[in-house]
Image: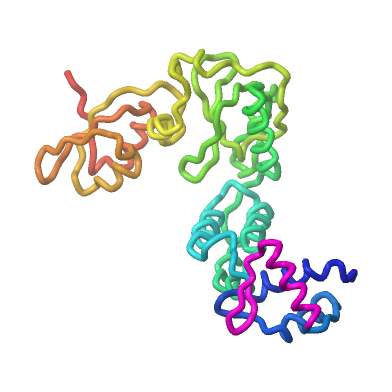
Amino acid sequence: MNKKMLPVCVLKILEEYSDASHPLQQKDIIRLLEENYQLEIARKALGNVLRELEELDYDICYKNGYYLDERQFTKSELHFLIDSVLADTTMTRLQNRELLEKLLGKESAYVKRGFTHVHTVSQLSHGDNPEFFLSIELIQEAIEKNCKVSFDYYSYGLDLQLHKRRERPYVVNPYEMMVSNTHYYLIGNYDAYDDISHYRIDKIRNVKILEASRKAVTQLPECRNGFEYPRHLMEHMYMFAGASEHVKIKFKNCIVDQIVDWFGKECRIEQIDHMYSYLFVKVNRNALNYWLKQYDEFAEEIKEE
């Protein structure tokens, strides 16, 4: 290997084999350079390389040895991100594994040992759409350019395989992408109508950015003041289409945590007694009916006469 690559190789070794708890002596770095890259270097020359890396603002520290202190994520942040990726069921198994490898790529071998559960990726449920990330990229580009998109939309058949819903592509005005209930959605407007619609991105294929400008979101009756991301997410908790309405729900106080999880802290609650309270919230009717079925022992809608 060309010795001009020496600083890069030393940095790679510090990234992979060192941290504050596992510093490396110069002799260790020299040995790893020989084993991993077939490079030989004298101690003095190695000292010069380490100083060069420090001058380039790499956070190389010395305490009982050399180690790279700067990491992209803290260990707790890395745990959260990795577990979030593992919980995702929309990516294919290959996409999931590649993303995990990127997250762990710049961590030391000692940190990587703490994530043995990453190997369970092959045992988890995964999506079937190899175009998932490409679709996200193209949709985002269309949103930035204010263009319409066309795509094929798929759904599962009884054979548990994805099938195209129709031969004619969907033409949609794209506005946002958002996560709801672990799935990633395109929020848009089907060109022939004047309401908001939702599309699972893991079921979208063959995305094309069209030259035609998208319809302004303020042209839609439910978005006269623009699209409000937090409000839409709260009102359409299961991503059902349709308008929202104001409702009153009587619920047992023991599920207040679930109320906040689903409706947020912007909702209004009035306590009736130590057992029950009222919830006042604006929500999509289909989503509410679905939610009430899950909590039928704890909540009921109160319809004003």
Figure label count: 0
Asked where in the image residue 82 lies, by quadrant, the reply is bottom right
In the displayed structure, 252 sits above or below 205; it is below
In the displayed structure, 250 sits above or below 78; it is above
Q: Is residue 48 magenta?
A: yes
The residue positioned farthest toward the right in the image shown: 2
The residue positioned farthest toward the left in the image shown: 273
Front position in the image: 137 or 106: 106
Front position in the image: 189 or 176: 176
Q: In this view, does 130 lie to the left or right of 232?
A: right
Q: In this view, does 289 lie to the left or right of 216?
A: left
Asked where in the image residue 101 lies, by quadrant, the reply is bottom right
Q: Position of residue 28 (x, y in %)?
A: 72, 84
Residue drawn at (69%, 33%), measured in percent from left and top?
A: 138
Residue drawn at (77%, 72%), measured in percent from left and top?
A: 49
The residue positioned farthest toward the bottom in the image shown: 27
Quadrant of the image for the C terminus? top left
Front position in the image: 125 or 193: 193
In the displayed structure, 91 sits above or below 66; it is above
Q: Give the range drawn in magenta.
A: 44-67
Residue drawn at (23%, 43%), measured in percent from left and top?
A: 298
Asked where in the image residue 289 lies, by quadrant, the reply is top left
Q: Is residue 10 left or right of residue 188?
A: right
Residue drawn at (19%, 45%), measured in percent from left and top?
A: 253
Quadrant of the image for the N terminus? bottom right
Q: Position of residue 215 (x, y in %)?
A: 59, 16
In the displayed structure, 69 sits above or below 161; it is below
Q: Is residue 138 magenta?
A: no
Front position in the image: 55 or 70: 55
